[in-house]
Amino acid sequence: MTKVLINIGGRKYVLDRDKAVQILELMSGYEVFESRWHKGSDDTYHVFKPDASEILHNGVNISSLPVDLYEIAKLAGRPD
């Protein structure tokens, strides 16, 4: 089975390709939640659909992971 890296929040996770595709499909209809701090007034909260540039620059990234690199990294386990 092909392994891929999926980057979420700056952390990379190893998944089978099919599982990564499922995650992307689940996220296809997502909305963004943001809070904005305003000096001297209350914070504001916003929920909105991302535009195309936000999806490309802030979305989930997937890249392939060669099998030999996966196996070496798996043997190494958690770093000290």
Image (spheres, helix red, strand yellow):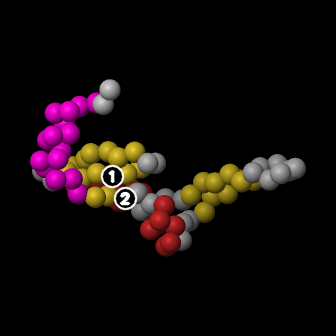
Q: Residue at x 49, y 73 (%)?
A: 52
View extreme (right): residue:
40
Does the magenta segment cover residue 71? yes
Q: Of 55 and 49, which appears nearest the observer?
A: 55
| Amino acid residing under circle 1 | Ile
The mark tally for this picture is 2
Q: Is residue 46 visible?
A: yes
Give the magenta part as a residue range: 64-78
Disc 2 crowd rating (10 Å Cα; few below 14, some 14-19, many 20+) is some
Dominant secondary-structure state across the stretch colored magenta: helix
Looking at marks 1 and 2 on the same chain, the residue that comes earlier in the sequence is marked by: 1
Label 1, label 2: how far apart the Cα atoms are: 6 Å
Does the magenta segment cover residue 40? no
Q: Answer with left or right where residue 12 lies relative to residue 64.
A: right
Q: Quadrant of the rendered structure where residue 36 is?
A: bottom right
Q: Quadrant of the C terminus?
A: top left
Circle on res. 6? 1
Measuring from the top left, give residue 4's x and y in whole percent.
24, 53
Q: Residue at x 40, y 45 (%)?
A: 11
Measuring from the top left, give residue 66's x and y in whole percent.
16, 53
Query: Pointer 1 and pointer 2: residues touching (CB < 8 Å)?
Result: yes
7 lies above or below 59: above
